Image (cartoon, grey):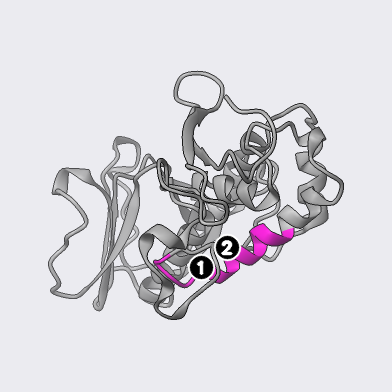
Amino acid sequence: MPEGDTVWRTAQLLHSALAGQVLTRFDLRVPRFATADLTGRPVLEAIARGKHLLTRIEGGLTLHSHLRMDGAWRIFRAGERWHGGPSYEIRAVLGNPSHTAVGYRLPVLELIRTTDEEQAIGRLGPDLLGPDWDPDIAVTNLLTEPSRPLGEALLDQRNLAGIGNVYKSELAFLAGVTPWSPVADLPAGVPERLMITAHRLLTANRNTFDRQTTARTPGGGSTATRLFVYGRSGMPCLRCGATVRRAAQGQGPGAERVTYWCPGCQQGPVR
């Protein structure tokens, strides 16, 4: 699932390619909106709100999309061959004379009134990369369910918007607790430091494709050393040398997410 920094960067690419330009192509390949035609209208802006993308178009309309697990927007220059996946995976095409934005495998795609955007995103907590970011509100939200495991609380976009599976695992590691630790059991000051760290990490990674949570080195380091635990199951911890482990976390079918942790560095319950 794309993290908030990936979605933020996607919004920047969409904005750069489309904003201020008149649409010469508008094609939504979903039954509900297949007949919608906004050609001839300028795109006003594209922004991210947590993991949601809002492309605002003149006339009071917004194209709302969400990438979820494997959706993607790709930007192509005029005449460039599209290469984001097979054509049957295309859900949206927005074009102007210089660029075409193609949405692949988008599980959420809807055309809504701009004045109704809150119906789609109104339940989100403070956005880690947005102007509404407020660490105090995020901490308060996390603590509303004291018995909830930290990993699940971090993934709940109603608490704070922008955390995905990678940052969930990395933040728990940096806090020195397992993702299964109840929020109420976090040592004093840890929730506040977690919010500061989360904002710092997403901000540092929003303009790069090579996400990194370890100390930055010239050249960015190897893939195996850019993250402390995520994706490193069976490998030695970069800090203590213990073998990094993985397990599923979440409640109910479809809600479980792969979680990584170090049994040497992180204290607390495990699955």
Tell me, yes or no, whether the two marked residues, 1 and 2, touch with CB atoms within 8 Å.
yes
Magenta span dominant secondary structure: helix
Instruction: Quickly name the residue at label 1.
Output: 206
Segment colored magenta: 196-210
Q: Is disc 1 placed on a helix, strand or loop?
A: loop
Q: Nearer the viewer, residue 66 or 99?
A: 66
- Location of residue 85 in the rendering, given as x and y in whole percent from the top left corner: 18, 51
The residue at 50%/63% (across/down) is: 8
Quarter in which the C terminus is drawn:
top right
Q: Residues within 10 Å of mark 2 (few under 14, many from 20)?
A: many
Q: Is residue 38 visible?
A: yes
The residue at 37%/72% (across/down) is: 18
Q: Is disc 2 placed on a helix, strand or loop?
A: helix
Instruction: Quickly name the residue at label 2.
Output: 202
Q: What amino acid is at disc 1? A: Arg
Residue 205 falls within the magenta-colored stretch: yes
Residue 103 falls within the magenta-colored stretch: no
Q: How many marks?
A: 2
Quarter in which the N terminus is drawn:
top left
The residue at 77%/58% (across/down) is: 134
Q: Nearer the viewer, residue 255 or 7?
A: 255
Q: Is residue 57 visible?
A: no
Q: Residues within 10 Å of mark 1 (few under 14, many from 20)?
A: many
Q: Nearer the viewer, residue 242 or 215?
A: 242
Asked if 255 appears above or below 259 in the picture, the reply is above
Asked if 197 appears above or below 68 in the picture, the reply is below
Q: What amino acid is at disc 2? A: Leu
Q: Residue furthest bottom?
A: 218
- Location of residue 89 in the rendering, given as x and y in whole percent from the top left corner: 21, 44
